[in-house]
Amino acid sequence: MTARRISLKVVEPAATGVILDAPPILRTDDDSVDYVCGKCDTILLHAEEHKVHGVQIHCANCGAFNSTDA
């Protein structure tokens, strides 16, 4: 069974706050969904749905900044 995929929203980089780089894939839980880059569809985060907020993830593959908040 493949994990459900949720596309993250591409945003401008934040001036302050938490910005993480991925891949490698960030993981918070093994039984969860894959959050993918909103620009290139690379898996960036593996976490429970609606559990990660207030974080930007910089995609190392395409350079896009993705928000975990909708």
Image: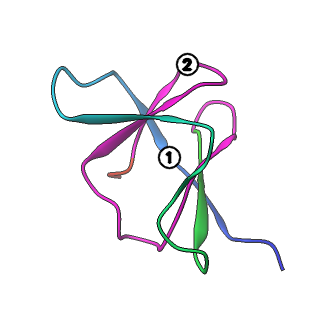
Disc 2 secondary structure class = loop
Name the amino acid, label 2: Gly
Left or right for 49, reference 6 = left
Left or right for 47, reference 13 = right
Residue 62 vertical placement versus 29 (above, below): above
Q: Earlier in the sequence, mark 1 or mark 2?
A: 1
Furthest residue toward left:
16
Furthest residue toward right:
1
Q: Nearer the viewer, residue 28 or 16?
A: 28
**What residue is shown with label 2?**
63
Q: In this picture, which residue range is highlighted in magenta?
A: 38-67
Q: What sort of colour scheme is used for the picture?
A: rainbow
x, y percent for residue 22: 55, 37
In the drawing, what numbered circle is on residue 60? none
* Residue at (50, 46) in percent of width and height: 8
Left or right for 28, reference 35 = left
Name the amino acid, label 1: Leu
x, y percent for residue 20: 40, 36
* Residue at (55, 18) in percent of width and height: 63
Q: CA distance from mark 1 to mark 2?
A: 14 Å
Residue 17 vertical placement versus 1 (above, below): above
In the drawing, what numbered circle is on residue 8? 1
